[in-house]
Amino acid sequence: KGRCAVASKDLPAGEVVLLEEPWALVLFPEQQGSRCDYSLKCAEKLLRCPSTGLCFAGKEYQKAAADLYYKAELDVAAAKRKAPATSLVKQSEMSSGAPWSWASYLRLAFRALQRGVRSGTQPWLSLQSHWEDLPSSKQESFQASAARCLDVLAAGMGILAENAEDVGDGAMTEAKQAFQAVANLSDVARLLAATEVNSMTVTDEEEREIALGLYLEGAIFNHE
């Protein structure tokens, strides 16, 4: 049903058929603090970010993460500190609902969304979400979470009215254009639904579940 992969030849047991880097990846909460957030490696000494709580096995991993999601989450943390009680993203939401404390699938979708903003692409639109099969209550739940994601994303990008003075006019215009390119509530709600359906558990060498990943090509193998 829907997208699928069909082998063009007989495949012997154990043959590798796909190697793919995830579009987005998050550690499970119980692994945070003992593994690098980017490489997933265990390390005796980890660099811990005081703003987000994310840990890295070295500065090279921290820098690599910054290009994908870490810088954006630092911006969210900064917005959280500055947010007045009357802001669109209220202090209560920013303090108890920052992305790094959300449910794993929602954190994963938010990182996918952040990467989409940076790259100007939305590759998840091709993923199966089975939206039409969802009950209205589930659709409404995804839409509420989508609005939450967009509010926090806007705050982190500094494009809310109360943050605008911290961003130059040129940068503000660029940020608004990048945000508006993905700020379709329906599309983001479907991203959340697709993430819940298509995300895959990542295991370590001992097959212990340590993370959740969104693999765009691998998702094809996740459907009948």
Image (tube, helix red, strand yellow):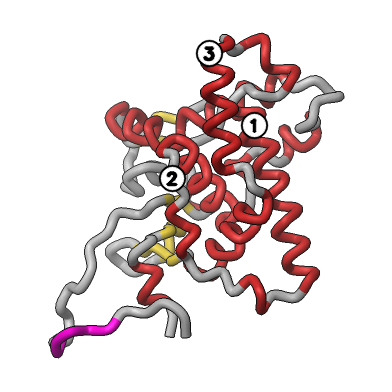
SS state under label 3: helix
- Residue type at tag 2: Thr
**Quadrant, the C terminus:** bottom left
Tag nearer the camera, 2 or 1: 2
Q: Which residues are magenta?
A: 6-11
Q: Residue at x 78, y 71 (%)?
A: 136
Counting residues from the N terminus, which is met first, the one under dot 1 or under dot 3?
1
> CB atoms at circles 2 and 1 under 8 Å apart?
no
Tag nearer the camera, 1 or 3: 3
- Percent x, y for residue 70? 46, 33
Q: Residue at x 65, y 44 (%)?
A: 149
Is 22 on the left-hand or right-hand side of 157?
left
Which quarter of the figure has residue 139?
bottom right
Above or below: residue 148 compared with residue 127 = above
Question: Does the stretch in magenta take in 194?
Answer: no
For label 2, the residue is 121
The residue positioned farthest toward the bottom in the image shown: 10
Q: Residue at x 72, y 33 (%)?
A: 94
Counting residues from the N terminus, which is met first, the one under dot 2 or under dot 3?
2
For label 1, the residue is 154
SS state under label 1: helix
> CB atoms at circles 1 and 3 under 8 Å apart?
no
Is 114 on the left-hand or right-hand side of 14?
right
Which quarter of the figure has residue 166?
top right
In the drawing, what numbered circle is on residue 170? 3
